[in-house]
Amino acid sequence: MALPAAGSPMSMSMINTELGDGTFDTIDLKAASTSLGESDAPFGMDELAGVSGTTAPSFSAFAASGGNGQIVITWTIANSPDSISLKVSDASNMGSPTELTTNNDGTHTQGSLNPSTQKFYQMSATNDGGTTNSSIITATSNGTTWGTIADFDLHLSSGGSAQSEESFEKSLTLANFNGNTDVTVEQPSNSSPPHELLVKIGNASGNYNLVNSYTASPGTINPASTYFMRFKLLQVGSKVNAEEDCTVSFTNNSVTRTFEINAQITSGLGRCIHELMLVDTPMGQKSIYDLNIGDLVNSYNYELDMMENVPIKEIIQPTHENLYKVNRLILTEDHPIFDENGKLLSISPELSKERYGLEAHKLEVGHKLKTLNNEELIVNQIRKYNGVHKTYTIITQNDNFYVDGILVHSET
């Protein structure tokens, strides 16, 4: 039987006849498969012939580059793939990969990445000629990286008139910065009129040259490798403020670092010392008005059982009218002091417990107090000290400091 012309249709019966007539014939299986169509044959003619009409895909380009909080992947694939698969992994061997949803348009952007995040990628492309896997590539996102800063409290005890409280110096580092930094301070709102939360900022410790005076709206500042700042909570009139968190935000290169300041102003409370009482320091006794945050004062370390010099962490200066005079020491009724054995004593121990959670005993005539030079000091007089007076307390790492040679508590 004569074969059809090359490229002409032929049936399976014709093929079977030719294969079984005992003569040598050449059959164009590719042409027969194309003419008949795969769906018309009892099995794939391409597979029978062992050849394919399509060449498998090949990668002429596959690359990734880091961007601001993102990584951009690009590719070029030859031989028209019918489908592609792009996978990402945190491991260099593509362990535990995740498939990314993408189109075969030559590019894909993986966003919402933290700065300095490394990712690994591999792509596969498939057509009738087979599947080809790319090499494994990697890239790292860039953008500003912020250091850490802890949340903290600014709690002011007001004596009924405008007061303020300052924090000790805070610092915040950044790397890979680009351009200026935007700074916002969320203001307290739990009073009417609201109080002010203020900040000043510099690029060196103690040098607040970027925002050189306290402000509630710092705005845009110049970049620096580390920002140094101090905050102030300013009371308006005699208003008090229920406890609330205020968010402070630093944004550079579209990357933001936030932290919270817990602001609170209470009325007429707070354990404090009269402003005339002198603070004991390594350089002798000093007025509270001659001291600053960071200056050294005398304090007692009960863990080491020794007196030591420690820096001032905070200075709080409210006004009070609930004062008493204990011998020569003038302090508020809820301010605990230490006896010679380290026990806390207070004129109103119930208020020390209620307001600050401190367990104190009733301060009475005859008690012996803890002194700087371990000299015996016996309480011989306790009496009300009338009037409204300026007061202070000092915050230290040991939660205490010496005033006129007497060890007093300082924790707020």
Image (cartoon, helix red, strand yellow):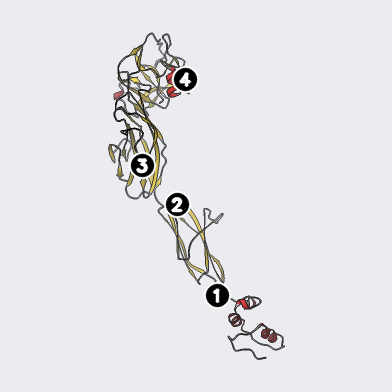
Q: Residue furthest front?
A: 192
Q: Amino acid at mark 2?
A: Leu
Q: Which residue is mark 4?
A: 359
Look at the numbered discs 1 and 2 and tell me whether their residues touch, using CB distance below 8 Å.
no
Q: Is 397 situated above or below 85?
A: above
Q: Marks 4 and 1, Cα distance to the nearest angstrom? A: 86 Å
Residue 104 picture location, percent across and down: 48, 66
Q: Mark 2 or mark 4, which is nearer the start of the sequence?
A: 2
Let me know if residue 28 appears in the view. yes
Q: Secondary structure at mark 2?
A: loop
Residue 258 picture location, percent across and down: 40, 42
Q: Is 60 situated above or below 263?
A: below
Residue 34 picture location, percent across and down: 58, 80
Q: Amino acid at mark 4?
A: Glu
Q: Which residue is mark 3?
A: 226
Q: Marks 4 and 3, Cα distance to the nearest angstrom? A: 41 Å
Q: Mark 3 or mark 1, which is nearer the start of the sequence?
A: 1
Q: Residue furthest bottom?
A: 2
Question: Label 4: how many residues lie within 10 Å, few (<14), some (14-19) or many (20+)?
Answer: some
Residue 339's disc is: none
Q: Which residue is mark 2?
A: 113
Locate the C terminus and report the quarter of the image it occupies. top left
Q: Amino acid at mark 1?
A: Thr
Q: Mark 2 or mark 1, which is nearer the start of the sequence?
A: 1
Q: Mark 3 or mark 4, which is nearer the start of the sequence?
A: 3
Question: Label 2: how many residues lie within 10 Å, few (<14), some (14-19) or many (20+)?
Answer: some
Residue at 38 percent of width and 19 percent of height: 402
Q: Secondary structure at mark 4?
A: loop
| Front tag of 4 and 2 | 4
Q: Marks 4 and 2, Cα distance to the nearest angstrom? A: 49 Å
Q: Which residue is mark 1?
A: 54
Locate the N terminus and report the quarter of the image it occupies. bottom right
